[in-house]
Amino acid sequence: MNIYQNILSAKTQQKKLLAVLIDPEKFELEHIHTFFNKVHQSIATHIFVGGSTDSNNLTTPLITAIKKATHLPVVLFPGNVNQITREADGILFLSLISGRNPEYLIEQQVKAAPILSKINLEIIPTGYLLIDGEKETSVQKVSQTKPIPQTAIDLIVNTALAGEFSGKKLIYLEAGSGAMKTVNTKIISTVSDNISIPLIVGGGIRTKQQIDTAYKAGADLVVIGTAFENDVSFFNELKKQ
Ligand code: 1GP
């Protein structure tokens, strides 16, 4: 499975992608089969697994169970190095480039390197930008970095471009899990017009209309976690044609 090549070719064909984000601390394993029945009837194309914390080391058993329940690619979206597991298919190798905390710019990556060098995960370098979603999110608390205000479009674009020029293969615009305000369309379209690598957008997206708006503005892949956690019937609105 070449996850990145598939994302790239979807972008070329203007086929939009949707990742369901599963937080190991919030997912109820006993409902895995009903959950994935819904996922498989929907337009979801990827499963992302991760959270800001995973104090009880739930990621490995969760991904083992997910791999049995689905053929969709399972991609780690780790809050820290302890969430890395060989059970996944790939990993977003994140650098929090909107922040200036060396721990999340390079230190976690250095700690991850010896683990990743021994296992066979597809590594996808990702420039991760925290954008103000009008709520103090876990990413902000854990990373001790400030989000970029939505009005600072030049800074957002230049940060995304710096990510691309540094070799990131994806740019992720993150308003934070449960954000009150999603990343606005002006930001999405300006970043999308200026970069050539695929663009991920997530944080606070709760409706089909918000998904479509993000796609139209230039998002190649939308990530949704909270809306599915709160109500699995949201999948019914996202049925495959
Ligand atoms: C969070 O972008 C993701 O990292 C998804 O956010 O939980 O608000 O959907 P939500």
Image (tube, grey):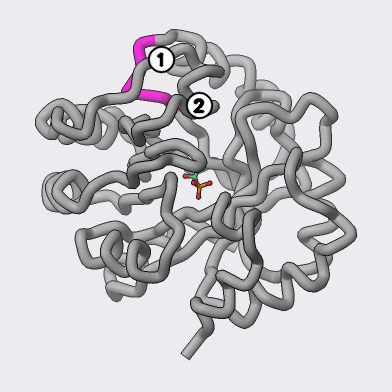
What's the residue at 79%, 68% (across, down)?
A: 69
Quadrant of the frame with the N terminus = bottom right
Q: Is residue 224 left or right of residue 230?
A: left
Q: Is residue 172 visible?
A: no
Find residue 104 and report its horizontal and vertical position in percent.
Answer: 48, 17
Q: What residue is at 35 percent from the left and 32 percent from the top? A: 134
Stretch in magenta = 95-100
Report which residue position mark 2 lands on: 139
- Mark 1 and mark 2 in contact (Cβ < 8 Å)? yes
The residue nearer to you, when weighing 148 against 159, is: 148
Closest to the observer, 112 or 127? 127
* Residue under numbered circle 1: 145
* The residue carrying mark 2 has its beta carbon less than 8 Å from ligand 1: yes
Residue 116 locus on image (x, y percent):
66, 31
Q: Residues within 10 Å of mark 1 (few under 14, many from 20)?
A: some
Q: Amino acid at mark 1?
A: Thr
